Image: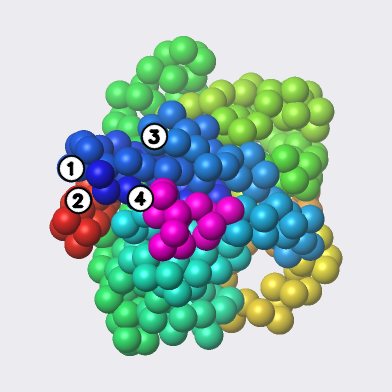
Amino acid sequence: MKKLVIVAGEISSDNYGSKLIRELKKTSPSCRIYSVGGGKMLKESDFCIANIVDRAVVGFTEAVREIPFLSKLKKKIVRNYFKPSSPERVDGIILMDYPGFNISIAKAAHKYGIPVFYYITPQVWAWGKSRIKVLARVCKKLFCVFGFEKEIFVGAGGDAEFVGHPLLDDMPDECVGERLAEEMNIHSDRKVVALLPGSRKREVETVLPVAAEALRYIDARVIVALAPSVKEEEIRKFIDYGEITSNTHALLLKADAAVIASGTSNLEAALTGTPFVSVYKVSPFTYLLARILVKVKFVSIVNILAGRKVVEELLQGKLTASNIKKYLGLILNDDSYRDCIIEGLAEVAGKLGTPGSAGRVARKVASELQL
């Protein structure tokens, strides 16, 4: 029986990882899959080594607290799944994003002769260019979800392939948005502003109070998107008005504008064509380190993919209620400004490839390892 380990450390990667496991099971039904991820991967895999998604944090300083736990976990994985003497030694490992931990795991797997596949390659081109060559050397195959990443890894001597972004498989059609509009009594006579404060508690605590102040008296209907990892009471601690929905995709389809914490949701807005303001804030020390280490001009992936400023980024000191009101007001009231953003979002959406990313990766891994 062939065996695989799959490691994902982020909420979005847990979702994509669960779909990858399902595709692997279709392609190779007898393959035994061990997971390090979250609840969704736990349900699909044969055995859960550890749940690290629930421990996900934001920023450098916040991550320091997790070092002892992750160090012990790495030793456990090496001992039980990599070493030749282990009865559970695996035939390969698939790593998903989460670079701080996964790059270390990749090097350890390579050392013990375990083939390494990286799906949703980390954004080392932004903050750790020395690691590009490391990944190119230790990974048997790099599956990139952005087209430009392939050229970067190939240029470093790696075997890389653009497989498209897995978010494309999550996007609903207009009918889903219409059902939400019917359920929430959303009509075209009043504009809707979507507020996506993030998927982690720390994000919500920093973004939501400022956004709540900005949107309190706005002439629009405010609806907050509730991430699966966030409880409704955590939202209500900071905003005592507006409505809440867990259907983020449908909300973006019906929203006229949005305020969104920087992250994968920025791509969701691009795919739905929803003009938005990107917001983010981390600890002062984390931000200082980011200024030193990060070598890209923009933070929002939408702007990075476009190669120019498509959406406004309100980061750190610029994240104020007055700034949110200013740029949101432009989206809602200035047609030329709004149309320019929508045009840029369409351009970005066109760069994300086609649906079926997980299936392509599963088939390629199965072929490489003869599962």
Of the residues under marks 3 and 2, which one precedes in the sequence?
3
Residue receiving disc 2: 371
Indicate the quadrant containing the N terminus: top left, top right, bottom left or bottom right: top left
> Which of the pair 146/89 is nearer the observer?
89
Position of 61 with respect to 49 (left or right) is right
Task: Look at 33% across and 33% down and name the residue there.
Answer: 172
Within the image, what quadrant is residue 351 found in?
Answer: bottom left
In what element is the residue under mark 2? loop
State if disc 1 and disc 2 touch (CB < 8 Å).
Answer: yes
Residue receiving disc 1: 27
Number of the label disc, if any, that sits on residue 4: 4
Position of 251 with respect to 319 (left or right) is left
Separation of residues labelled 2 and 1 (CA atoms): 8 Å
Of the residues under marks 3 and 1, which one precedes in the sequence?
1
Task: Look at 64% across and 39% down and name the residue there.
Answer: 54
For the magenta stretch, what is the residue range?
Answer: 76-89
Task: Look at 56% across and 24% down and name the residue there.
Answer: 245
Callout count? 4
Q: Is residue 98 above or below residue 125?
A: above
Percent of width and height locating residue 333: 56, 46
Percent of width and height locating residue 28: 20, 42
